[in-house]
Image (tube, rainbow, N blue to C red):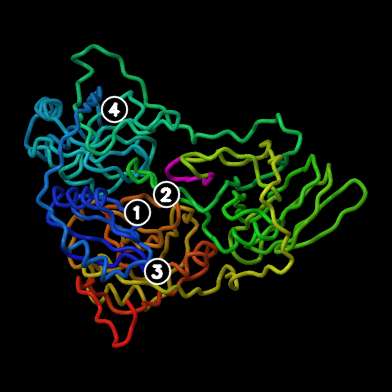
Amino acid sequence: MRFLPASLTTILVELADLDQTLALFASLEANPIKGIEETVPAARTLMIRFRPADISAEDLACEIATRDLSAKIVPSDKLVEIPVRYDGEDLADVAELTGLSVEEVIRRHTESEFTVAFCGFAPGFGYLVGGDPALHVPRRQSPRTRIPAGSVALAGAFSGVYPQNSPGGWQILGTTPLKMWDIGRDPGAILQPGYRVRFSDMETSGKEVEAAETPSMGADVRSTSNSARFEVLTAPIPAIFQDLGRFGQTGQGVSASGALDRSSFHAANRIVGNPVNTACLELTLGGFSFKSTTRAVIGVAGAPCVITVEGASCSFETGTYTPISLEPGDVVKFGNPAKGMRSYLAVRGGFDVAPVLGSAATDTLAVVGPEAIVAGSVLELRNDKSGLSSVSIHELPAFDLPSSGDTVTLDIVYGPRTDWFTQKGVETLTNQLWQVTPQSSRVGIRLAGDEPLERRDSAELPSEGTATGAIQIPHSGQPVLFLADHPLTGGYPVVGAVAEYHLDLAGQIPINAKIQFRPLGPFAEIAATRKTKISGEQP
């Protein structure tokens, strides 16, 4: 085993092969280690997020190093058959890469029995292993920006089905009408780790194929049965509900998501006296407005902006970090922030929004959570006011928010794949400024620099788990800094990760600002040796 740092609270365990990875995953599931919060298995790695207050990275490595990896995973008795129309645009390329005819590629794919090794990338996306080795082909050199939902594809030793429209670099063999992910089902994913899978050719069966549907996000916030509500008038950029995120759903390929600036999220709830983790609206770059049908108290934290309240008898302007009392008929308008990117709107008592998989967070990449809020949306407010505390009039920003054109310094931890880059490449990461591009989103901040990062070689990295804050380097050499809605697994090397205490700041960096990465130390593997206690130290 190799133990590699992935962030201050995450390590990556590298193993010999998939069998060892699954054996370690099963061992930790059967006999957990105190302090582990989440594990994400992949091709030959296990990403582990832990609580440093309970266990150190070194002690965690020591505990894991003793686990038996010889046990084989018992195959599931669950068999899923996936009908396929083999009409994929890469089918001929796969035939050429393998030296087989198109007919032979289809035959070998349909005669193989696969097993779902793990899930990742997107909800319902299962990485299938056990196919014919003759069909092992590399990813496309140039990934597509959009692969249709239901696409059946190959990459390396894996086969898989894209559950929704998404970018990707796998070789497409065909399409299936099956809905791989549906939040209305329990579980939402057809494919679960351990399930057996077979593909069938729809042409020989005579069945007609329909395009797989894009899954709904799983919650409706437009009901108007409640008289206490906010009616959204304008939303130039759709607002989204956020809380602290959903955890424990990695087995279905669902990552946590959640508020990008947690300090501002918490402050907004404290302003109105809400319990911790009450869902707020995340507003991006202002311009949002709504009409209140009831008396209410709101609070706004994060990117500072002028807030105008227009009532029947009077109008006034106010700002963030203070409670604001509303009367029925009041119209609230948000100006454009001079600094930062995102503000958080809380209402005393909370919004009446249904959680999806245990959370009200909207994951924009995975398409999980409440629908985005646009002009015409109706936001119902909770009638139950229990559990509230006093409003707070002493809230302040946790840090100075950056403006467009500012240079923001972010501390980073090297790893897990820093050694995939030349010394010059590593120095390039920290020695130059990186500009935030307009292609940035909640998924990640896309950066542009004068000099791309130089890799040691062009080897293909097997898919592995990625942490929030990871700095992934695609073929272009221009970094992508993963934020809360990043994919659960990725296939490009991660050179480092932003320290957790700077993630809130990262979520507020506007377009055209520049980022300076500051390493906390050199790259080093985590030694599986316990630290020697100082004499007199209590256990």
Closest to the camera, between mark 1 and mark 4, is: 1
Tell me how far mark 1 sits from mark 4, CA to CA.
Answer: 33 Å
* Rendered residue at 19%/22% (across/down): 200
Tell me how far mark 4 sits from mark 3, CA to CA.
Answer: 47 Å
- Which mark sits nearer the N-terminus, 3 or 2? 3
Per the rendered image, the range of residues in magenta is 360-367
Tell me how far mark 1 sits from mark 2, CA to CA.
Answer: 8 Å
Q: Does 362 appear in magenta? A: yes
Q: Mark 2 points at which residue?
A: 247
Query: SS of the residue at dot 3?
Result: loop
Mark 4 residue crowding within 10 angstroms, few (<14) / some (14–19) / many (20+): many
Quarter of the picture containing the N terminus is bottom left
Amino acid type, callout 3: Ala
Q: Name the residue under label 4.
A: 175
Q: Mark 3 points at which residue?
A: 53
Residue 375, x across and y down, in percent: 67, 39
Closest to the camera, between mark 4 and mark 3, is: 3
- Which mark sits nearer the N-terminus, 4 or 3? 3
Q: Are marks 1 and 2 in contact (CB under 8 Å)?
A: yes
Q: Which mark is residue 38?
A: 1
